[in-house]
Amino acid sequence: ASSRHLYPSVLLNTGTLMPLLGLGTFRLQSQEDSYNAVGAALTAGYHVFDTAAICHNEAQLGHALRRYIDLCLIHTQGLPAGDKQNYWLLGFLITH
């Protein structure tokens, strides 16, 4: 069994279990901090990494996570639904 099932989770409408425990990344700004935090969080069993466009760290987090991503949930909070930054982030995560 995967370690992600040891933590409280929610069942998404796709049938995927999404852990409720995650790492907030709003203070991570440098690439080094992002790599260190992601590595430590993965070692500790975290499988969710939360960021937002307002954090201005999507690129650094994307680079640190690109070998580990198996689910990317993108939503808007306080931004217009058609905001170009959200689509840029999705494209960046898929292509990098």
Image (tube, rainbow, N blue to C red):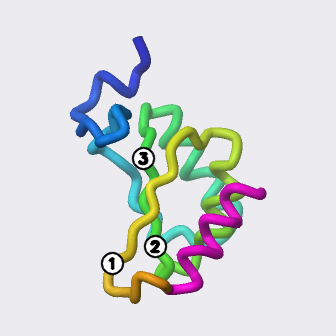
Determine whether 46 is above or below 60 in the image.
above
Q: Identify residue for label 3.
A: 48
The numbered dot on residue 77 is: 1
Mark closer to the observer (3, 1) = 1
Quarter of the view holding residue 8: top left
Residue 67, compared with residue 53, is above or below; it is above
**Which SS class for mark 2?**
loop
Image: magenta residue range: 83-96
**Does residue 4 show up magenta in the picture?**
no
**Quadrant, the C terminus:** bottom right
* Label disc, if present, on residue 19 of the rendered structure: none
Relative horizontal placement of residue 4, taking residue 55 as reference (left or right): left
Question: What secondary structure is the stretch in magenta mostly built from?
Answer: helix
- Residue 91 in the image, given as x and y percentages of width and height: 68, 66
Q: Earlier in the sequence, mark 2 or mark 1?
A: 2
At label 2, the amino acid type is Ala
| Tags 3 and 1 touching, CB below 8 Å | no
Query: Whole-percent x and y of residue 2?
Result: 43, 18
The amino acid sitting under disc 1 is Gln
